[in-house]
Image: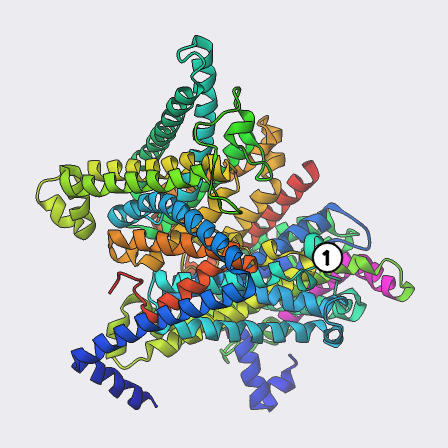
Amino acid sequence: MQKKLYSIRNSIEENPQTKTIIRITSILAVIIIGILLVIVGINTYTWNEFVVRASKSLVDGLALSMLLFLMVSGFFLIFGLCGVINFAHGAFFMLGGFMGYTIYIATEALFLDIGLFGTNYFLLSIVCFIVAALGAAGVLAVIGGGIEFFTIRRLYGNVIAQILLTVGFMYIITQVAEIIWGSSVISYFITPNSQIEYFFISGVLDFGGALKFELYRIFLIFLGLGVAALMFIAFRKTRIGLLIQAGIEDSEMVEALGTDIKKLLTIVFMLGAGLAGLSGAVLVPWIGANTGHGLTYLIYAFVIVVVGGAHYGRFEGTFFGALIVGLSMQFTAYFIPAFEGIIVFIIMVLILILKPGGLTGT
Amino acid sequence: MSNESIDDSPRARNLFSRFISFATKNKMLLSVIVVLYLLPMTTGADLSAERDLLSVLTQIMILGILAMSFDFQLGRSGLLNFGHVALFGVGVYFSAFTLNSVVFEGLNIIPYPITLIIAMMIGAFLGFIMGLTTNRMRGTAFAFIALAIAMFLYNFFYENPVLSGGETGLRVATPAILLTAPFYLFFIGIAFIVVIAFFTMVILYVKDRTETVGLIFFTPVMLSLVGFLLLFGTNIFGAILVAGSLLLMIILYLMEKKTIIRDPLQVPMQSSVDNENSSNPLNRYILPLGIIALSVGAFIVAFGTNIGDMISLWFTGTDVFLYRIPTMYYLVLSCVVSIYLFTRRIIASPFGRMMTAVAQNEERAGALGYNSYLCKIVVVMISGAVAALSGALYAPFIRTIDPVTALGVEVSIDAMLYTIIGGLATLLGPLIGAGVVVYSELNLVHILESVGLPGETWLVGLGVIYVIIVLFLPLGIVGSVSVKSRSFRERIQRLQIGDIELGIKDKDYWVFALIGTLAVFLVLLYLTIAV
């Protein structure tokens, strides 16, 4: 049996044509399975309801994946360049949510006090939102940079100690948040707690029937895409972006060519933590700020990195991984709610069995 | 251990010499576990502070077993496993189903010891499945496949309230066998065997160490045992008997010293028992047997009332729940000791070297002809069996289980923390790490409040402890201490008191182990009473 399998594998390696055939068949299989699923879906629900559910899950899934991508790219940057499995990343994300919430409420109160925008609540809300998102990113960047500068800097190369250290920070951040904001039973949302009870993009896009989309989620897709595009451009065009990319490929070589790698590592840590904070803050109007989010989103970050093959240093892996995880989660949430918590793991197992290196890995 | 049986049958002789060589080689182990085995006797058929401490120690040891099984994967064979909790959880749930009459009625008939064995088999089977994935999954990928398996199980129990007991969780009854006097007496018997082994070790030490150091060392040990009996014994006679055995030891020591000096050739004595030259029956048989008889008698006299009280509970049939804590403690302690010995044996075996080889460089190990795939599967299977055992012990201990405590990711992270804090790839490290973390989890609130800080910050305190440990003890407690104590040891070996050179050797360290264990116990007991 073993011999036979071996010979098949050999013949595949020898013939490049078989590889193409296998690739085409697998794509066809995926398409056929998809069509079958659609037919089953239409059969179970009516056509109209199917369309409603599918389009809703598409919008929600895209929005979630964009934001997951922002968070995980922070995780990936830290993992790729510093080699640190950052267990505190979920806690960064969670704290970013609380920072965004607090800063939003505080700036709104401030602007109302000085009466800068008068009764133009729309402008007021937009300015507050931008301040909150950037403020959360900034605070988290400072926290992440501080952690790197004072502790992790001494522990590069010692993976086990880094795990222990980041778990310690995860506990500290989570517990401090629980002391300040209460346990994970309570979620904080902006609109019910703000003074003017108005958020600039809280409406619903109505296409008639049950086809309603929350505007904020559509906005999130574009926001996420925009930030992602900015990041891609920054990585391709700026000097520091190129240095980070080169460092992920081969950090020793970058150091040998005269770059201060220590400074670069601190910057990357700040960037990663800042991205987590930004995505946490931007997600507050949707999922709220909750102290229990830390561990959940940490596990999503892990899964996305593994599924996308980003642990082999492919940046685009995080993008595809986030897309798959976000879409599959929302589709199961709308169609098979019992599988919502487990679908990402099923997909992860399937992908790892077919391609042990993840989607973009070797 | 009579004279005839030693001389007549070679097999008995073989067994006896094995016993002797075990006692001489495991001085540290024996002197630690003799204290641990004596602890439950200090409590009788009433509620006391010692019982609370025993309960805490039981929890520490159960989670210590979990950490040891985790260390077997990560420390010994380099397999990082985020789904370790799955192996633990199947043990928890299997043992819960056999002890709970609601879910599966048929499983109720399985007695608890067999439950433990079946749970280990289930754990090994799950470990086998996990191990199969190591062929293609390396490093992080394996960790996440295992995590996926754990999450499948978690979701399975979470989505099935019938199996997991819903909101309130599954209630687990205490196994009936734990509440019986014969089971208790069985472990008391084991405890006395350990006591006999310990004193055999002490006698061999006294005969071996005829230098002045010997006298300086065994006297404080016996005196601290006298103090222990005075503090916790129900009467004063036990302490007097131990003092008597100390007297006999000093006589034995002086006699041995004389024979050594009389010997003109100064032949170094390898093992006193095998040495046929010292044919004096007094210091060969009478004194050692007298010492053992006196000291075993001492413990029987000192704790007889407590043991008698416990046994009478069974006959009267009232308050049998009082058996629970001592028997559970003894069961878990025996499991810890056997797993410790088993792990040590495996690491020293050829298979253990193969594990190390595969962990360090898999390709090279493969090129040398080792089947690294098989090796990894076996490692995960063994580790799975041990983890399931700890789970099966944990279910009746914690009494109410829900999917989060049995199968949550937090348990994996905790097991990792215990291992890393104690020290990776050290035998005792995981146990000590579990001790530090679990004890501070249970008591940090009180400690912080007594200092004047708000108690709700205890998790912050725990995080700060982790950060401090990482920054100052990067190899874990046991690892870093053993590295740092090397120079200290060299200094202690050249220690002098006045003109006498002590010449402390490796075989003397058991004294510190015993006195240290007693001191730790006293401090913990004081804290339990004070808090």
User: From where the camera sits, is residue B517 visible?
Assistant: yes
Chain letter for the residue marked with disc 1 in the picture: B
If the image is split into quadrants, where does the N terminus of chain B sit? bottom right
Residue B124: x %, y % from top left: 52, 74
Question: B504 and B486: which one is in front?
Answer: B486
- On the picture, is B237 further left or further right than B343? right
Q: State the residue at coordinates (32%, 72%).
A: A28
Q: Is mark 1 on a helix, strand or loop?
A: helix
User: Residue A58: x, y in percent?
Assistant: 42, 52
Kind of residue at badge 1: Ile
Residue B290 covered by magenta stretch: yes
x 58%, y 46%: residue: B439
Where is residue B491 shown, x and y percent of the image?
A: 36, 47
Left or right position of B39 against A80: right
**In the image, A315: left or right of B146?**
left
Residue A54 position, x and y percent, is 46, 55
For residue B483, above or below residue B174: above
Which residue is tagged 1?
B325
In the image, A27 versus A47, the foreground residue is A47
Q: Please report the residue visible at 72 percent of the width from the left and 76 percent of the height from the top.
A: B110
Classify residue B526 as left or right of residue B368: right
Say which of B369 and A18 sits in front: A18
Looking at this view, is A278 or B267 the one in front? Answer: A278
Give neighbour class at mark 1: few <14, some 14-19, many 20+ (Cα, 10 Å).
many
Q: Which residue lies furthest to the left in this view?
A: A257
Residue projecting furthest to the right: B316
Outermost residue on the top side: it is A114
Assign the magenta stretch its main secondary structure. helix
The span picked out in magenta is B287-314
The image quadrant of residue A122 is: top left
